[in-house]
Amino acid sequence: MVIARVLGPHGVRGELKCAVITDMPQRFATTRTVYLGPAHQPFRVQRARVQGHRVLLQLEGITTRDQAERWRNALVEVPRAERAALPKDTYYWQDVIGLSVVTEEGERLGAVREILRTGANDVYVVGTDTGELLLPAIKDVIRRIDLERGEMVVHLLEGMR
């Protein structure tokens, strides 16, 4: 699970400046190991300092600016088993993307392709046979999300088609 992306080195002692991707930046205080890059190379976290939408990570084995530079743009990940528990009716985006979307009547509409963050609520972008369908993530529209079945049950309001 991606929690940050390395922006580049910070200072000369190998610290990584990262963009926070998680909605729970407090998790960095307890994260002991992170995995970098496509090979998921493990690194023990020596220190993490959250600064707004950024986190500065000092990782064991990365001690110079040149070593830190090598990880620019790398994703910072943790195992799915270490995901923080979410409140009821709250889901990780990566669990929602790909869900099959069906109406309460059983009509298959498509699958969630993307999630847009707006000011009021998220919007699910559903790929359909005829294009895209935008569904606001509100209780009047999203009736149920069943991760085990891989399904989102929706009620289409008038004018949504």
Image: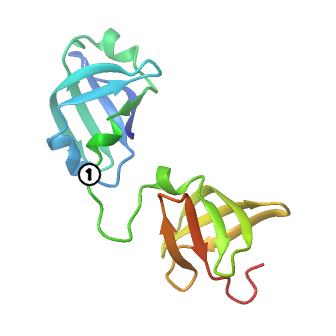
Residue drawn at point x = 36 percent, y = 33 percent? 77
**Which residue is painted at 17% across and 31% down in the image?**
32
How far across and how far down the image is residue 78, in percent? 32, 35
User: 105 or 18, which is in the foreground?
Assistant: 105
Quarter location, residue 9:
top left
Residue 119 percent location from the top left of the image: 48, 72
Quarter residue 42 falls in: top left
Type of amino acid at the residue the image marks with label 1: Ala
Return the residue at label 1. Answer: 84
Q: How many marks?
A: 1
Please state which of residues 138 and 155 is positioned toward the viewer in this rendering: 155
Q: Quadrant of the C terminus?
A: bottom right
Q: Position of residue 124 (x, y in %)?
A: 60, 65
Q: Is residue 160 left or right of residue 35?
A: right
Residue 119, above or below 72: below
| Front-lying residue, 41 or 47 | 41
Residue at point 73%, 67% (across, down)? 109
Q: Quadrant of residue 6?
A: top left
Query: Compared to 78, does 113 lie above or below?
Result: below
Q: Residue at x 25, y 17 (%)?
A: 14
- Compared with 121, 23 (above or below) is above
Horizontal relation, residue 98 to residue 60: left or right: right
